[in-house]
Image (tube, coloured by chain):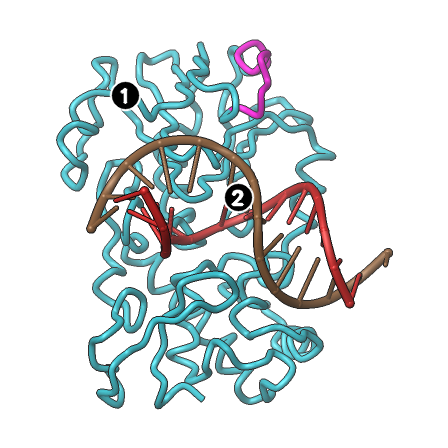
Chain colours: A cyan, B red, C brown
DNA sequence: CGGATTGTTCTTCC
DNA sequence: CGGAAGAACAATCC
């Protein structure tokens, strides 16, 4: 569920909480989550967190005085970060979490724990084990970065380039927008929301989308994600931020999860279909 | 119990 | 080789 706005929410919170902290220990509770790197603790010992960057849905941590050491963190479907005090309690939050998860960390879904010199700790929880936090060198980071297309929230987003590439694709517009190498950051929720705002049906062939429509799609992709960032992302099923709190963009959703309810524009019931292999929500009347 | 679930990557097919 | 479609990954919920 975490898409660009949720990852950005987590990134900003983590930056505030762990920048400058010294890692004194790493405990891997599940090897897969650490990329099967059994030396991760050794590699990170005494390293000081310098910055957290993000491209698309991928977070990139860098370290003081280390030009060739990075951590790549991807939440995939169910990844979460929790920052806790030495007693294992979430510092200042946790109100949105179910009781059993909030009570104490680490818990059964905790995959990796990072301990800091000031006795605080960061837990990476991931129920479905698709996410990861793994060590990477500069070349691997560069390779990962180069695999992403431009972000719709970028002030320098090139609409002409976006339109040209979009119209070359012979897939449903939704499939194109979900391709991170084409545009970075959109996932299932924000694609549906973007296409509703842009009044374009998700099943339309990308090659048949007009330049005017492409411009609208680019605009609303940026706008929905920027608005979502400003309210802490969307909680649909699993997302909570590093305080264990829900995102508030849920209140702004127009079509995602709204099947059967009236379209906010034309009152036609929103339908849910399968498109690009995903559950897809749209208005059959005002999205053409 | 069958089917669905937010993301990405690999395989298969054309 | 590239693009596109679908499976796979794993756990849980309804």
Q: Residue at x 39, y 37 (%)?
A: A79
Q: Residue at x 64, y 57 (%)?
A: A181
Query: Where does the image place residue A226, in percent across and percent down from the top left?
Result: 39, 63
Chain where mark 2 sits? A
Mark in front: 2 vs 1: 1
| Residues packed near mark 2 inside 10 Å, few (<14), some (14 to 19) or many (20 plus) | many
- Vertical arrangement, residue A70 with respect to residue A211, above or below: above
Q: CA distance from mark 2 to mark 1?
A: 24 Å
| Mark 1 secondary-structure assignment | loop
Q: Residue at x 61, y 76 (%)?
A: A159
Is residue A200 inside the magenta stretch?
Answer: no
Residue labelled with disc 2: A58
Labels 2 and 1 share a subunit: yes
Left of A273 or right of it: where is A54? right
Chain where mark 1 sits? A
* Quarter of image, res A65: top right
| Mark 2 secondary-structure assignment | strand
Q: Are marks 2 and 1 in contact (CB under 8 Å)?
A: no
Left of A48 or right of it: where is A243? left
| Residues packed near mark 1 inside 10 Å, few (<14), some (14 to 19) or many (20 plus) | some
Left of A231 or right of it: where is A199? right
Residue A128's disc is none
A109 or A81: nearer the viewer: A109
Residue labelled with disc 1: A107
Q: Give the extent of the magenta segment.
A: A34-43
- Vertical arrangement, residue A88 with respect to residue A236, above or below: above
Which quadrant, please, contains the C terminus of chain A?
bottom left
Q: Residue at x 36, y 29 (%)?
A: A125
- Vertical arrangement, residue A50 with respect to residue B2, above or below: above
* Quarter of image, res A39: top right
Query: Where does the image place residue A22, in percent across and percent down from the top left?
Result: 45, 17
Query: Where does the image place residue A254, in percent across and percent down from the top left?
Result: 28, 73
């Amino acid at each position: 569920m975490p898409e660009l706005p949720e990852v950005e929410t987590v990134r900003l919170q983590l930056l505030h909480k762990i920048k400058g902290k010294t890692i004194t220990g790493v405990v891997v509770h599940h090897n897969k989550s650490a990329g099967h790197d059994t030396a991760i603790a050794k590699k990170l010992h005494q390293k000081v967190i310098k910055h957290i960057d993000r491209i698309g849905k991928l977070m990139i941590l860098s370290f003081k005085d280390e030009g060739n050491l990075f951590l790549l963190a991807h939440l995939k479907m169910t990844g979460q970060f929790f920052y806790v005090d030495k007693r294992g309690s979430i510092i200042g939050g946790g109100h949105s979490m179910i009781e059993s998860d909030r009570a104490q960390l680490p818990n059964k879904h905790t995959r990796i724990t990072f301990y800091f010199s000031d006795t605080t700790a960061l837990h990476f929880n991931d129920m479905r084990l698709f996410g990861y936090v793994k060590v990477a060198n500069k070349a691997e980071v560069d390779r990962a970065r180069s695999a992403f297309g431009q972000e719709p929230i970028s002030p320098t987003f090139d609409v002409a380039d976006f339109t040209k590439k979009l119209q070359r694709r012979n897939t449903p517009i939704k499939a194109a927008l979900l391709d991170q190498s084409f545009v970075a950051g959109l996932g299932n929720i924000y694609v549906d929301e973007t296409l509703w705002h842009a009044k374009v049906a998700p099943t339309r062939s990308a090659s048949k989308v007009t330049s005017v429509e492409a411009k609208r799609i680019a605009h609303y992709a940026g706008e929905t994600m920027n608005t979502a960032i400003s309210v802490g992302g969307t909680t649909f099923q699993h997302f909570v931020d590093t305080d264990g709190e829900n995102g508030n963009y849920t209140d702004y959703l127009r079509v995602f999860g709204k099947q059967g309810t009236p379209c906010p524009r034309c009152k036609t019931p929103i339908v849910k279909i399968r498109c690009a292999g995903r559950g897809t929500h749209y208005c059959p009347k005002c999205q053409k």
